[in-house]
Each structure stands twice: as C-alpha cells, then as structure tokens.
Image (spheres, coloured by chain):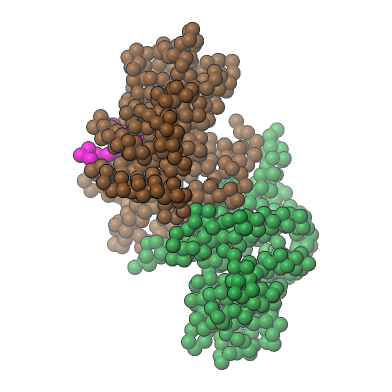
Chain colours: A green, B brown
Amino acid sequence: MTQPDNFGFGEEAALLKDSARKFLADNFTTDKLHRMVASDHRPERISACAWDRDLWQQMVRLGWTSLAIPESAGGLGMPLAAVAGLVEELGRAAFPCPLLGSLNATYVLTACGNDGEAALTEIAEGMTATLAITNAEGSWDLADTGVDSTSGQLNGTAYFVQDARKVDRLLVSARTTKGLSLYWVATDAEGVTIRPDAIVDLTRDQAHVIFENVQAQAVSNNGVAALSHAMPAIWTLLAADITGAAEWQLQATVEYAGTRQQFEHPLGFFQAVKHPLVDVMVLIDQCKSLVYNAACAFDTEPKRVAQFAHMAKASASECAAFASSRSVQSHGGIGFTWECFIHLYFKRQKHSQLLWGDAAWHRAQLANILIGTAA
Amino acid sequence: MSESARQDSPEQAEFRDYCRQWLASNKPKEPSVRLPLSPLEIMTEEQLSYLQGWQKSAYDAGLVGCDYPVAVGGGGRTDCQRVANDEMIAARTPFMPNVIGLGMAAPTVFHHAQEALKERLLPRLFSGQEIWCQGFSEPGAGSDLASVQTFAERKGDRWVINGHKVWTSLAHFADWMILLVRTDRSHKYDGLSYFVVPIRAALGQGVTVQPLIKITGETGFNEVIFENLEVDDGYRLDELGKGWQVAMTTLLHERGAGELQTPRSGGMKSKATHSSNTANLIELARCTSRNGKPAADDPLIRDRIMQLVIREAGLGQNQRRARVSALQDHPARLLLQNKLLASEIAQAIGATAMEVEGASASLYLGDDNAPAGGQWPMAYMNSYGMTIAAGTSEVQRNILGERVLGLAKSK
C-alpha cells in the first residue's frame, strides 16, 4: 500500500484541527490554566488534579473521545492523521484532560478485536480511560508489568498511570501463566486503590494504582501483540501533543524576544538569541512532519509504521527538551520564576519527553529495524 | 519523498509511464571517463561533453523543462518535472551538467526577461548546449550580497561593465552568465540591476576567467574579471534598479524554495561518484571493522547514525508537508529551511562517516587502501561549499528568524 501525498489529512481533518484550535483559544487561556493548576507552588505539594470538567464534557459532546473508535463500535472511525491534528491543538493549549489516555486505550482495544468491542462502546458513550501497563521501574518493554493475574483476579501495582484520577476505566496489563493479558477495570471497582504521585508537571496527574484481588474481565489474552499494534499510534499522538506544546513555547518566546529590550535592541535582534529560536523551529517542523508521516503510515502503510513512529517520538523527545530549554533560557530571569507561564509548558514537555520511551530508546529500536540487531 | 509515497494526477501517471519506458531503453552507458561528484566539480572537456550529451537526449525526450510553456522550449505540462526527476533518479542516470542554468538562470529568465529573450535563451539552456554560470559573489560581497561593487555604466543603449566576481562555478565552460551589478552607487539595494551576459563570446575581450582551487584540491570554480566589457541593454532583466528583486527569484530557486521544480537527474556511479546519504553511511558502518566487530554493531555509532536518519527523513517529510497547506501556519516556513537542512545534514553525515572509518579516514583519493576510494573525506570537505554558498547557514538562520518568526533584523 502507498501513502497518499497529503498524509491522508483531508478537509474533514483540517476542519477538526481548526475548530479545536478555535474552541480552545475561545474557552481556555494560558492565564486560566495557570490559575487552575499552579495555586500551590510548594515543591512538596501533592498534585491537586485540578481540571475543567465542564469544558471537558463539551469536548466529549463534540465527539473528540470517539474519533478513533471504529464505526462498528459507535465511533467516528477517523484516521490517525486527523486525530493527531486534534491532539496537536490540545498540546498547544496544554489542556489537562484524559483525551490522550482515552485515545491510547481506544487503539489498544481496537487491536484486541471482538473482545475489546464492549469496552470501546463504553468510550463511545462518554467513558474515559487510561493505560495501566507500566511497572515500578518504568520499563518501556511491553512484556513488563507490575500486576499479576490469577484466575481472573488482579494483584499488584501499576505505576506511572497517566491522568488516573480523571478517568472511569483502566486498561491493565497483567502477567498470567501463559503470558500477558489485558483487562478492562473500573477505577471504582472493589480492590482498586489510586495513589497519586507527587509530580513536577502541573498539567497532568499521575498515580500508581494498587490492585488487591480485583475481579476483572480480560479483553485480550495476547496482550503484547495488541499493545505492539497500538504503540505506534500512542507514540505518534504523544509526539503530536509535544509538537503543539513546542509551538506554544516557540511563539511565547518569540513574542518575549520582540518586546524585551536590552542594549537598546529587542532580544531577537541578537543572533545568540535568534539562531537558537530558529533551531527550535527547525526541530518542531522536523517533528511535525514525522508525526503526520507516522500517522499516515498507521492508516495506510502498516509495514513501516513502527519505523516511522520511532522516528516521530525520538524527534519529539529532542524537540521537547530543546524547546523547553530555550524557552526558559531566552526569557532570562523572569523565565526562572513561578509567575511566568513558561514553566507550565517546560514541565509538561519534560514529562512528555520521557513518557513512552525517550529519544535514545526510540533510536535504538529504529536501529534494530534499519540496521538489524547488533551481534 | 520517493514517488511510491505519492498519488499522481492522470497527467503525471501517464507521463511517469512514458519516462519509465524511455529511460529503460535510453539510459546512457557507463562513461569511460570518471564522473565528478556533482556538476560543480566538472574538470575536463571529456566529462562535460559526456554529460552534455545526456542532457540533450533527456531534453529531446521531454524530461527537462517539463513544466515550462512550449513557446520557450518547455514541455507545457503541469507539475511533471518532479515526476521526471523521480524516474531519472530511480534509474540512476548521470546528472545534468547545466545545473546553474536549470536551477537558477531558467526560472529567473522565465520570470523577468522579455518574451523574445526567453525564446532565444531557454531552449539551448534546457538542452545543455549552452552552459550557464552565476556572477553574484565578489571578494567584498559574500553573505552581504547587496554590497556588490561590479559596476555597469550606461553608454547610449549599451553598458560598460567593470569588476570582479568570485566562486563562479562552471565559468570556464560557460556560454552565459547571470550577473548582478551596481548601476547606482547612491542606493544599496535599489542601485542594483541584473543582466544576462554572453561571457564565452567575450573571453579575452573584456572577460577573464581564472580557476580557483578548492579545499579538496579540485578545480571547478573560478574568478571572473570584467574590464570594460560592453553589453547591449537588451540583455538587462526587468527594470533598472530592480536587480535585487530579480536576484531574490534566483536565490529562492537556488535554495530549493522556488515555485518551478528544477530538473534533477543522477545516481549513476563511476569509480569516484559518491553521495552523502544515510543509506551509504549505514553501508559503510556495516563494512567497517571496529575493534574486531562491525562498526554497525557499536551502540554509539548506531545512535549517531539514527540521529542522522531522523534528520534526513524529517527533511523529506518537510518537503512533502510543504504541499499540504492545512498543515502549515506560514507559507515559506518549510521551504526556507530546505537549503539550510540539506547542507547541514550532508555535512553531519560526512563527519560521521569519517569517524566510522577511524584511522582509514586519513587516506585520500590517491591511496589504494582508502575506504570508498577516499570519497568520504572529500565529500565532508565539499559539504562546506554547501553550508557557505547561496547564503551561509548563519544568513539562512537570520532569514528564517526575521521573515518567518518576525524577530528584529540583525546587523
């Protein structure tokens, strides 16, 4: 199969992206974000999980959580390229919500075949979800998990669960005698305890989730296969989020470099400031182009999707790190303070940089594909 | 982007079939002469005439100038040059020698010359029968191009030109030159005008071409000295004082950001042909032993190569995304990055290749033990031509910062 020249990013996708951008710009300013999530500055704070549920409900009514769900399960069945466009805009706004988690669960459940269909229908009806598939050391190996399953009962702990306190359902990976299975578990089920982590990023919440004799229904008994199929979409969407957030960082920094005067010139006059900002732009564009290429491959060229998605997330992790670094540095003293909004994105990007594989890990996977495994 | 990743219009699909068929039976045989790395390193008449022969046959077959109107010697097609380019590159044809003519002079003449002049110049430019060179840079005007001092003084309906141009690739073979000169010393930008000049006809009669030797030891570019050269006013492009605007058309195309696709052909290898891409770099790493194991097994080398693979793929996808307006916020943002990225990526690939080669990277073309015939150190050195020519990388970053990001103009 060949990829369409326009990444499969058609009129419908363009409309969705534009309307999302407008909706967020109209309803959710960075000032509002700061007031909502940054009221407690103490380094010892426990994440408050403050978010705008009313606005989120409007997004759900707009159909954003069911975009990726196949039409057969009550969703809109839109291509990943279109979904990436929406996520890019959400990243630009850094809107705290369980959209990425719900989309991630959607791609995994879709890969589960018939057994995932009931869970997909729940998402289509407005339920939110997130992945609980990571062990205590944060391994990116899909076969690793901190949860065991014995005759349908889950015991153990899932770590680094994103937006756990915002969701209704967990998609849990657990070790069985035969391998790895996936389970669909309600966050309020008996035996499930959500323990919030105290994290740096103010725009997300994260938790470890303890399972004690939790009764659960398996949605897949071949968990590694289902996760492997979905991970390229998950990497690509996180990379899209990073792209949007990095563009916000760039534009905010460019604006500051245009107004702040030193030595009788705006900061942007000086090439020591200007050229690194151009390099941020170059990295954003590389990342964005690779995101839509990977998304289009997920939709049309499955043979090469892993390769392209590793490129996208490796690029995104570099982009997140560099855009964040330059945004604070170019703001100078004010950029180092809590009152300057730059820190919100700085922290979100550092979180994203290391989530679902950092740049070096993705490049190592890419090398295995392009060069072959080293002897 | 390879052609396999695109969908063709009906015209493109039909033309693609035609190109494939034609190339299958008409691709030239391996030359008896050594082919240079690029058209800018053509050193001998034998190399030139072999390559001119190829360009002429490709033009006669309709694979060059595809998107220009028929009246000026073009093919009258729509967005078909890139189809021909895909196919010529896939067929590993030789490159075309008239690279400055095709890439820079043709779009400039097309956009700014009078109709009769276009009809006279473009067909022989496309066919490669007349080779073109570019007279922009001067000893005192490099990155600050608008400070050129070569002066054209009016004498009735003729102009008398005096001055000194440098870094002039292909001047020793060229019939024509695109020339940026000063016609008014009181205005920096508005005092510039733009000419096409028949330099071969004037050799020894107002024009002197002297070779410059590059960092690699190759020749290929020159300095050109004008002493009271008389040129007809009919060879002026656009209005008097509009030279800077005309030069922008040239530079836009030189930097790969122009509207008209440049004919591209290439891939044929002779003993010393070489291309700085990551496929070749990976091949090199596989063939190179490092502490008793293939360099391609070294995790640090693998990581370095993958960084380059990602940058190279990113550039390819930028070029694809540049045609999808819904995925861009600024129309020139991607196009203006082309030259900067292509040159810096090629340079980084060359540098990495030398590190992969290790001690053997010390061996040059004359050494039988040199890996890949000594091409990697040569390519690495040549890459500085790309990061310096057509506006240095530093100038490119100023342009991007100012025109795209809207930052204050630097001095």
First to last magenta residue range: B31-43
Q: Quadrant of residue B410?
A: top right
Placement of the N terminus of chain A among the 4 image quadrants: bottom left
Q: Position of residue B339 (x, y in %)?
A: 48, 40
Q: Residue at x 29, y 57 (%)?
A: B287
Height in image: B267 above or below A33? above
Q: Residue at x 45, y 49 (%)?
A: B10
Q: Position of residue A233 (x, y in %)?
A: 54, 66
Q: Nearer the viewer, residue A335 or B178?
A: B178
Q: Residue at x 48, y 19 (%)?
A: B236
Task: Determine if residue A25 is in view.
Answer: yes
Q: Nearer the viewer, residue B225 or B119?
A: B119
Q: Residue at x 48, y 37 (%)?
A: B260
Q: Nearer the viewer, residue B87 or A221?
A: B87
Name the main secondary structure of what is drawn in magenta.
Answer: loop
Height in image: B97 above or below A164? above
Q: Position of residue B370 (x, y in %)?
A: 26, 47
